[in-house]
Image (spheres, rainbow, N blue to C red):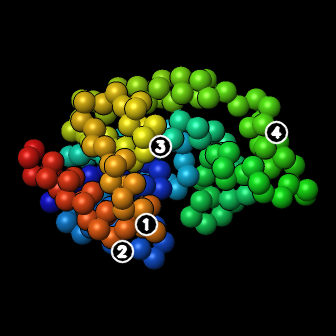
Amino acid sequence: MINILVVGDSFAAKWPFAKLGWVDILSYRHNVTNLAMAGCGEYKILKQLQSVDITKFDLIIVSHTSPSRIHTPTHPIHVEGFHKNCDLLANDIIDRNNWFNPSLRAAQGYFKYHYDDEYQIDIYNLIRQKILNTVEKQPYLSLTHTDISRELTIEPNCLDFSDLWKKERGSINHYTINGNRVIYETIAKHINEK
């Protein structure tokens, strides 16, 4: 049994009422501190790491997110519950009714008039490099679940689950029960090799 820190987005977060996610299975066998939050961007993942003394953990697992998530301290729609720490993503807000929500209108306007994908990728890469610099002297695993996150991988200890996600999309950590089992078993294999 080892002490594991998990940081990341909803691919790694503890889902409400779920007991069969890969993080849940991992926590049945190890001491897991899970700081991952649904819908958060790479900046919040960095802040999760910076909020604890990472030297107290035997393994750090970083689940990376999409570069197109825009940091916000307060989401215009998700103000409580599972997504209360969510960052902005165009697909989440573009088609929402905005008549009585000036914050939502401002966010929609940003994506419509100001969003720059090249800038977002550059910022994402800088933050991801800072995350790597933070964890690289500790035992760590980096996880990706989407094609864009895989394409922007810089970490030598990266487990790419983007093909698995295409086949095993589901309702717990965005995977089926089988997909979660595969992720757990892959991580367990790396733990046993240490």
- Amino acid carrying mark 2 in the image: Lys
Whole-angstrom CA distance, mark 2 to mark 1, is 14 Å
Sooner in the amino-acid sequence: mark 4 or mark 1: 4
Earlier sequence position, callout 2 versus callout 1: 2
* Marks 3,4: beta carbons within 8 A: no
Mark 3 vs mark 1: give the one in front: 1
Q: Does residue 120 show up? A: yes
- The residue carrying mark 3 is 65
What residue sits 37% from the left and 43% below the top? Answer: 144
Which sits earlier in the primary sequence, circle 2 or circle 4?
2
Task: Give me the residue at 61% from left, 66% from top.
Answer: 81
> Along the horizontal axis of the image, is 153 left or right of 116?
left
Q: Report how far apart the C-alphas of labels 3 and 1 lie in the structure.
A: 17 Å
Residue receiving disc 1: 170
| Mark 2, residue position | 19
Between 181 and 58, the residue placed more toward the observer is 181
- Position of residue 121 measured from the top left corner of the image (x, y, whole percent): 54, 27
Q: CA distance from mark 2 to mark 4?
A: 39 Å
Q: Earlier in the sequence, mark 2 or mark 3?
A: 2
Query: The residue under label 3 is which amino acid type?
Result: Thr
- The residue pinned by badge 4 equals 109
- Gap in Å between the C-alphas at discs 4 and 1? 32 Å
The residue mark sitting in front, 4 or 1, is 1
